[in-house]
Amino acid sequence: MAFYLGIDVGSTTSKCAIVDDGSKVVGWGLYRAGAGTQGPEKALDEVYSKTGVRPQAIAASCSTGYGRHLLDWTDFQVSELTCHAKGAALLFPGVRTVIDIGGQDAKVLSLSADGVLDNFVMNDKCAAGTGRFLDVMASIFGCDVSELSALDEQSERIAQISSTCTVFAESEVISKLAAGTSIPDIVAGVHVSVADRAYGLAKRLGVKPNVVMTGGVAQNAALCRRLAEKLGCDIAVSEYSQVNGAIGAAMLAREKSTAQ
Ligand code: ADP
């Protein structure tokens, strides 16, 4: 059995995945530290120890993400746009739109009927609408970003967050807390504001179903639900959403090495 390794060195988090020659995801590793840190090594340690696959058993590897150029030992280096399209098409055959929200940018990809990247739009100029915005908000509430979804579910009245800039939104949230607005209502407002940004981006490209959300932020179920309401269609999310780009990279390592 041959194994293929994909490694996605993101701005905040390093992810890796191993697929076998039957396109099955054998396992993944993740470490919350990105480009220029020990993150990639830690994520690799995790995937090898979780799967029992030995590094010598890897037939080919591919790196992707913001810090992919720092990993010169991989056989291939491919942009995260191509890798996210590839991963989503493996996990959700028939996907036509991928919304990827990571730590520092948000992207919307459109795929052809046979699952190949066609076009994309991207916001990488501003933290609003990205994981960074949610990380800043979670730290104000004194919780982890993984707790935001459950807080939103408890909201009774969505607090409006009118600032689109992260720095101003931070002051706005702090003053709402001081004025007695509940944390769940503010979290709901924060999610609506992120969903609005993603919706605006998606509208620029046009949204064709089926829609899949990837990236770390896709794990925020309440946010996905708010975005799905705006889009007026379902959004599919896999258990592998944050490692989707790494899975796509592993698939490309397989395709490129077997085509040689
Ligand atoms: P990057 O590739 O830029 O490092 P990721 O796709 O790994 O970005 O996503 C990182 C973002 O995902 C973080 O900034 C954080 O906001 C969000 N995130 C990570 N884990 C969770 C979780 N369990 N629930 C909700 N959001 C999460």
Image (spheres, rainbow, N blue to C red):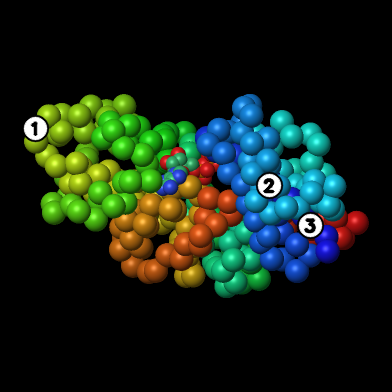
In the structure shown, which secondary structural element does the residue marked by tag 2 occupy?
helix
Q: CA distance from mark 2 to mark 1?
A: 49 Å
The residue sitting at 79% across, 65% down in the picture is: 21
As drawn, 67 above or below 229? above
Residue pictured at 81% horizontal, 36% vertical: 73
- Left or right position of 58 against 234: right
Disc 3 residue crowd, few under 14, some 14–19, many 20+, Cα 10 Å: many
Q: Secondary structure at mark 3?
A: strand
| Residue, disc 2 | 49
CA gap between label 3 and label 2 equals 15 Å
Q: Is residue 92 above or below residue 29?
A: below
- Which of discs 2 and 1 lies nearer the camera? The answer is 2
Crowding around mark 1 (Cα neighbors within 10 Å: few <14, some 14 to 19, many 20+) is few
Amino acid residing under circle 2: Ser
Question: What distance separates the C-alpha of mark 3 from that of mark 1?
Answer: 56 Å
Seen from the viewer's position, the closer of residues 241 and 1 is: 1
The label nearer to you, 3 versus 2, is 2
Figure quadrant of the C terminus: bottom right
Mark seen at residue 179: 1
Measuring from the top left, give residue 51's x and y in whole percent: 69, 54
- Mark 2 CB lies closer than 8 A to ligand 1: no
Q: Secondary structure at mark 1?
A: loop
In this rendering, which labeled residue sits more in front, label 3 or label 1? 3
Residue 3 circle label: 3
Indicate the quadrant containing the N terminus: top left, top right, bottom left or bottom right.
bottom right
